[in-house]
Each structure stands twice: as structure tokens, then as C-alpha cells.
Amino acid sequence: MTDAIFVSLQAILALIAIYQFGFSLFGLRKKKKKEHFPPQKSFAVLVAAHNEEEVVGALMENLKQLNYPKELYDVFVICDNCTDNTAKIVREHGMNACVRVNPDLRGKGYAIEWMLKNLWSMPRQYDAVVMFDADNLAHTDFLIEMNNDLCTGAKVIQGYIDTKNPEDSWITAAYGISYWYINRLWQLSRHNLGMANFLGGTGMCFETNLLKEMGWGATSLVEDLEFTMRSASKGVYPRFNYDAKVFDEKPLTFKASSRQRLRWMQGHFTVARRYFFPLLWQSVKERSLTKFDLALYGVNVYIVLLTFLMTAVMWIDSSLLGGPHIANLYGHLPMWLSYAAIAANVFTFFVSMILEKVKFKKVYLYMLLFPIYLISWYPITFYAFFTQNNKQWSHTKHTRVVRLEEVQSKQG
């Protein structure tokens, strides 16, 4: 009985891997034809900030330089429980500093919910709301791209999340490699197929009427994934805009990265418990591949956990107990097939970097350490499973001041 369960689980994981690899192939080609519209949509640009005095000034300068009519967008910085000069710096740049003090309800999700309530009560109402983090830099055409998508009927839009500091350390390089892969072979592939994309926490755009109708309601540790699932359950699918780039600062050290990823995984477990089965059931009833795909993405944290546990059991069985005593699906397959599967998985990261024309020389050298980053997700996810009820938000300190011109010049 145990052998049958183990082999069945291995078969399911293998099918999921083949499914995801098959989808990635649709991201190899980028469609060139797009509809362009004159600027007409108005935007409230929200920036979530907690003690970001070191980096928020660079973003304020950046947002002043957007290629979009200045009368069509306003910037509101949510100074959430700040104890530094974040608000002062924002005001010095002529932007709106919205100070929030609530030590009991901490975190980006709560801050956004508070800001939206204030926004709806203001005299001026906007067509859409754009969200950035304080450490970000936005491409000068970001709002133009959001305007184009809104004019074609999109209600929720995710921009291309790039890395502004991929050469700072092997960890920032690992983040960069992961995001180039996600943008090209995950997000773009689904966009090309007309399916739903997922939100990434920054570089997001929401139609105002939709937000007013649905409410924000995303206050978990992963508010982006939570809103993705909420909107999908109502038949509103996020769209990906490949050309709307936002550059995000990544943690410099493995310790800071682990803390950030632990928070992500804790939040993912919460969202998976809440939304996986309802969304899966909807996908079956409606025969919707799009909802099935999002449900599978939502439960990915359990897939990672299951993979880790089964790998650990197999290693203990063969190395410490003199096995194998447990049936192994892969033991019945040719050895070359296992190596080919691993090689194909690693090769997709190289392919994504080539397709994205990555020119950071250090990043290619750091690829040697990239497997450590990938493997580290397993113990982080395992620990997150036992600490998933911890709802305490932890702040990732940002110190890397980079200007958009520097990022673009390094990209060639």
C-alpha cells in the first residue's frame, strides 16, 4: 500500500513538472503587435514604505520623469509606521506623504487597505491605481503601457519585475535569474496563450471600479497572491505587460533572503489553504484550464514541500537504511531520462537569460552557485509549514540607491 502511494505521488509530481515545462515553451516567442493609445487614463500611484529614507528619494525622482502627462497621475507614499525621515523626504520632492500609525496591524496588505479607503474619500477620483514598493524604479513608459492595457479592457495588470542590483552578490544574481525565468517562461507563456497571470507584489495596476467593487481584502503575508486568487475566483484574470518594467531591489545576503522567502512561504500556505480547493472545484465545474492553472500555482508551496519530503525519505531509505525498501518510480526508468530531465530544468534558466538578452557578466559566473539558491527553498518551505500561523510581518531593509539610468546602461 505504501509503495503504491509513493509511486502515485511520484507520478503526479512528474506530470506536474512536464505540464509546467510544456507551458514554458509558449514563452519562447514574444508577440510584437500591440495596440497603442494616447494617454487618457488617470492614475493614483501608491508607494508602500516602511522606514525607506535611504531609497525613497531615488524613486520620487524616477516617478517625476515618467513619460506621461503630469496632470494624469499623482503619487501617494504610504509612510507605514515609519520612525525615520521617509515622510519628510517624500514631501521635499513635492509628493503626497500619507502617514499611517497602527502597530497592531502591520504589513503592506493592511497599509494598502488603509490607503485605498482614504483614496476613495478624496475629491479627485482616478481611473486606476498603480502600486510600487519604495525601493523600486519604474521604466519611464510604465504608465503608458498601463494606459494601453486599460484601454483594451484589462482590469488587473502585472508589469515585468526586473532586478536593479543583480551583480551585487550571488544571492541578488539568483533572484535575477529566477525573475528572468518567471517573466519570460512563466508569465509571458500564459499571456501568449490568453490565460491568467499572477501578481508579483509590485508594478501592479488595478482598475478603480474593480477595487471599489471587490475591496482590497488582501492582508496576508502575500497580498499579491491573495488578490490574484480572489480576482480569479470572480472571473477577473490578471494580465501581464512584458514592456512595463519595474526594477526591484533584492536582498544582498543569504540570511536576509531566507527571512524574506520564509515570509513568502508562510503566506503561500495560508492562501493555498483558503483558495486551492474552491478554485480547483470552479475549474472542474466550468471546465476552465485557466482556473486550474492558477489553482496549481496556488498550491505550488505544497508541491515543493512534498518533493522535499519524498526526496528526504528516499535518501534515508537508500543511504542510512541500506535500501531501497520503498518502491521508486524512477528506478524503472532509464538513468539517462532522469539526467535529461534535470538538464532540461537547468537549461530553461539559461534559455530565459539568453532570450532576455542578459548582459551582466557576473551573473553568468554566479550561475555556479544558483543550485544552492534553488535547493535552499526546500528547508525554507519545510520550516514555513510548521510556522505558517505566524502572521507577523517582517521588514526587508533596503539600502541600494541606484538610478534608472545606471540600471539601463548596465543592461546595454
Image (cartoon, rainbow, N blue to C red):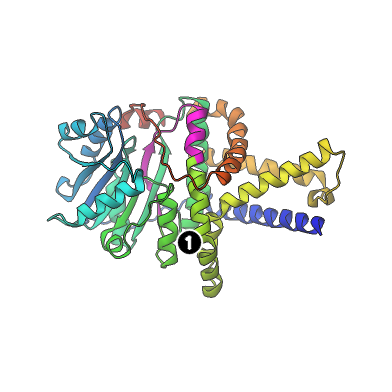
Could you tell me if residue 21 is visible in this image? yes
Quadrant of image for the C terminus: top left
Q: Is residue 361 above or below residue 98?
A: above
Percent x, y for residue 243? 37, 47
Could you tell me if residue 40 is visible in this image? no
Location of residue 381 (image quadrant): top right
* Residue under the point 43% across and 33% down: 250
Callout 1, which amino acid? Met
Percent x, y for residue 407? 37, 30
* Residue under the point 48% across and 55% down: 271
Q: Which of the pair 202/336 is nearer the observer?
A: 202
Q: Is residue 312 left or right of residue 19?
A: right
Q: Residue furthest left?
A: 123
Residue at image mark 1: 195
Percent x, y for residue 221? 43, 46
Extent of the magenta region: 240-262
Q: Is residue 382 magenta?
A: no
Q: Which of the pair 191/225 is nearer the observer?
A: 225
Q: Is residue 359 left or right of residue 133?
A: right
Q: Is residue 341 above or below residue 83?
A: below
Q: Is residue 204 left or right of residue 11?
A: left
Q: Which of the pair 102/309 is nearer the observer?
A: 102
Q: Is residue 228 above or below residue 180?
A: below
Percent x, y for residue 183? 47, 46
Secondary element type, mark 1: loop
Q: Residue furthest bottom?
A: 285
